[in-house]
């Protein structure tokens, strides 16, 4: 696995969907790049109750894309991002399954953050046939470091 191959594949995944942001990364690819890029930041866009219920990645910046209850847009999202990152930073966005992080990545790209990436499968991914998350896809299923509250 090398950085250029990862970035090329991530960009191709997004282009295939007709979206506009830096790329779609697997959790393993995101973790690899986070370890190697000096301006990389992991931003978890889940709501506070989701972090408390299902766990989180230590050292991650938490800025909810939508607020609980009601999952309404966070009116302070842009301000909170600006306080924690600059448009030159590489921002790796993580949510529960990859949907909200994709929305946030596209939003940030339109704001001039040309290195906003979505993490495919999110933190827990889709449920397995028994309804359990974190087993088929996502950060947890990949066996990457995380903590339960």
Image (spheres, rainbow, N blue to C red):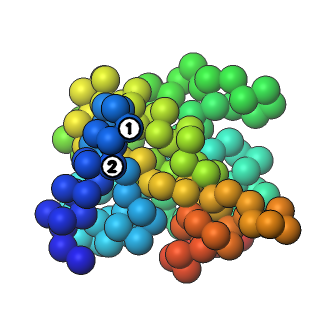
Question: Badges 2 and 1: C-beta atoms under 8 Å apart?
Answer: yes
Residue 80 lies, in percent from the top left, at 47, 32
Q: Is residue 144 visible?
A: yes
Quarter of the figure with residue 112: top left
Q: Residues within 10 Å of mark 1 (few under 14, many from 20)?
A: few
Q: Is residue 62 visible?
A: no
Tell me: 18 left or right of 87: right
Q: Quadrant of the C terminus?
A: bottom right
Residue at 55%, 57% (x, y): give it. Answer: 121
Label 1: which residue? 17
Residue 66 lies, in percent from the top left, at 63, 31
Residue at 37%, 51% (x, y): give it. Answer: 24
Tell me: 36 left or right of 106: left
Residue lying at the far right in this picture: please name it: 130
Label 2: which residue? 13
Q: Report the Cα–Cα distance between label 2 and label 1.
A: 7 Å
Quarter of the figure with residue 113: top left
Residue 94 lies, in percent from the top left, at 51, 51
Q: Quadrant of the N terminus?
A: bottom left
Tell me: 129 left or right of 97: right
- State the count of labels: 2
Residue lying at the far left in this picture: please name it: 4
7 over 85 or under it: above or below: below
Question: Element under label 2?
Answer: helix
Residue lying at the far top in this picture: please name it: 75
Pick the front one: 93 or 40: 93
Tell me: 145 left or right of 72: left
Question: Element under label 1?
Answer: helix
Q: Residues within 10 Å of mark 2 (few under 14, many from 20)?
A: some
40 over 70 or under it: above or below: below
């Amino acid at each position: 696995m090398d950085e250029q191959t990862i970035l090329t594949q991530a960009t191709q995944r997004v282009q295939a969907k007709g979206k506009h942001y830096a790329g779609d990364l697997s959790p393993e690819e995101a973790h690899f790049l986070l370890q190697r890029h000096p301006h990389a930041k992991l931003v978890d866009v889940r709501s506070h109750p989701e972090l408390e219920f299902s766990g989180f990645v230590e050292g991650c910046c938490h800025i909810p894309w939508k607020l609980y209850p009601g999952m309404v847009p966070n009116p302070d999202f842009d301000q909170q991002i600006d306080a924690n990152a600059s448009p030159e930073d590489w921002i790796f966005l993580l949510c529960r399954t990859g949907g909200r992080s994709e929305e946030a990545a596209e939003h940030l790209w339109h704001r001039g953050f040309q290195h906003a990436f979505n993490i495919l499968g999110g933190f827990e991914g889709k449920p397995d046939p028994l309804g359990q998350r974190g087993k088929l896809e996502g950060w947890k299923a990949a066996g990457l470091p995380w903590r339960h509250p």
